[in-house]
Amino acid sequence: MSTVAGESPQAKQSADNEVTGRLSKQWSARLPLPDSHLVDTRIYTDPAIFEQEIERIWHKTWLPVCHESELANPLDFRSSGIAGDVPIVIVRGTDGKVRTFLNVCPHRGNLIVRKARGNLSVAEPSGNSNHMTCMFHGWQFNAEGRCVEIPRERAGYQDRVCKAGMGLRQIRTEVAYGGFVWVNLDDDGESLDDYMGGIFDYMKVELESEPLEVFHYQKVVINTNYKYFHETGREFYHDFLHYHNRQTGMMQKGYFDRKYVPYKNGHCLIGLTISQYKAYQGYEDRGLTFPGMPKNGWKGIGLFPGITFNLRSSCLRVNFMTPISENRVLIEVRGLGLKRDDDETRASRIRDFNTIWGPFGRNAHEDFLAIQTQAVAVRPGSGAKYCVMAREEDDTTHDEIGLRCYYSEWSRRMGRLASDPTRTHP
């Protein structure tokens, strides 16, 4: 080891220690930060914690499952699932009301509806039209969930079982906030409005002035924890990941001044900014917008436990998630425009959407890549210990208050601290 004139070997070693990486003891030591500013990586990887999340969070909160435009006609249906593999079917009844049912036959526990989407007026080979029919034994249910047919009912069950007592398990359902269909497995939980706590007032004009319609649907299964993907919609410091966002947003006046506002129940919103699309080579300003939205405007809402509404002038992107395991998540991406759009207008919205958020766009695939590599980096045995959420910038764009808001609610509902899941939440 060489030293400069007048420098002792001990001094040179001390200087080296100051600029090199940390040894195991230093790496594992907790930073001198409050609980709100750190997340223990075990909450992303521990299967027992994941199972508790399903029970205490996902089965107790309001979740969107589709949009009413995907159930445009009476007897239209969509089958789906809620976290923890709870199969559901959403049906628009002959009365026009949207209802959700557990997609499980009360007879022997078989799936009833096996298609992803369709209309009940098309009869199944095992049953009549206008009914949901279990193929196993031919039990049939109408769009209101009533059991309307049990083959050889009297011969086999006499008076011990009857159709009147064998209806489907109905799930609390509301259509609200721009026509989205929301469900809650908890029969006794708070109302949808109470759960949202007024956050949708921020997008009320844009979402409710005119009927909306889904024009894009994409789903992807990624080997990562669901919280990682939701985090990408909660913090904008990661715009350094996106060259497009750096050019059209971060380099523009006012970008860093947007306010980040936390709401109750772990929700949050990010204030309005104007994207400068002309700053990106080959782009032009978007001519279309939503009611009440300025040209090229951009605003967003993050909902606990894993929903994002992202409105960029001409199109609305909404992300739903269905956690599958601690290291696997189904992500559904919907793009929406105005229902009254003519063909030319709709084509423009689709083009704008796909340019940024489509499978080959400028943004989404980068997020998907990042959250997969996060999962690789923190898997058990990797040596990862903490994720840092300590940026404070007066509640503006790159402040990580949205993440801290999320994990405060996570800790409350889980009864344990996100910063140390072995400790009880006070």
Image (cartoon, helix red, strand yellow):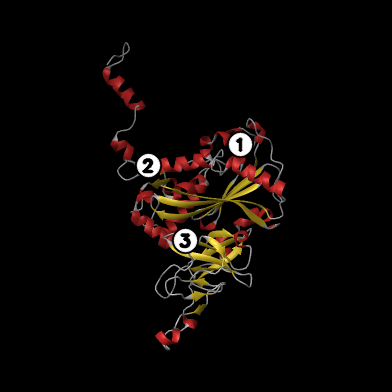
The residue that appears at 64% across and 70% down in the rendered structure is 96
Task: State if disc 2 and disc 1 touch (CB < 8 Å).
Answer: no
Is residue 423 something one can see in this rendering?
A: no
Relative horizontal placement of residue 9, taking residue 353 as reference (left or right): left
Question: From the viewer's perspective, is the residue at label 3 or at label 1 nearer?
Answer: 3
User: Which corner quadrant of the image does residue 136 belong to?
Assistant: bottom left
Relative horizontal placement of residue 319, taking residue 105 as reference (left or right): right
- Quote the CA–CA distance across marks 3 and 2: 25 Å
Comparing 346 with 156, the one in front is 156
Mark 2 element type: helix
Q: Tag on residue 232?
A: none
Mark 1 element type: helix
The residue that appears at 63% across and 32% down in the rendered structure is 280
Which amino acid type is marked by label 2?
Val
The residue that appears at 32% across and 12% down in the rendered structure is 4
Q: Residues within 10 Å of mark 3 (few under 14, many from 20)?
A: many
Residue 198 placed where, x, y %? 61, 59
- Quote the CA–CA distance across marks 3 and 1: 35 Å
Q: Earlier in the sequence, mark 3 or mark 2?
A: 3
Q: Residue furthest bottom?
A: 159
Which amino acid type is marked by label 3?
Ile
Q: Earlier in the sequence, mark 3 or mark 1?
A: 3
Q: Earlier in the sequence, mark 1 or mark 2?
A: 1
Q: Which residue is mark 3?
A: 82
Which amino acid type is marked by label 1?
Gly
- Quote the CA–CA distance across marks 1 and 2: 30 Å
Name the quarter where the C terminus is drawn: bottom left
Question: From the viewer's perspective, is the residue at label 1 or at label 2 nearer?
Answer: 2
Q: Which residue is mark 1?
A: 249
Q: Which residue is mark 2?
A: 376
Residue 14 placed where, x, y %? 31, 24
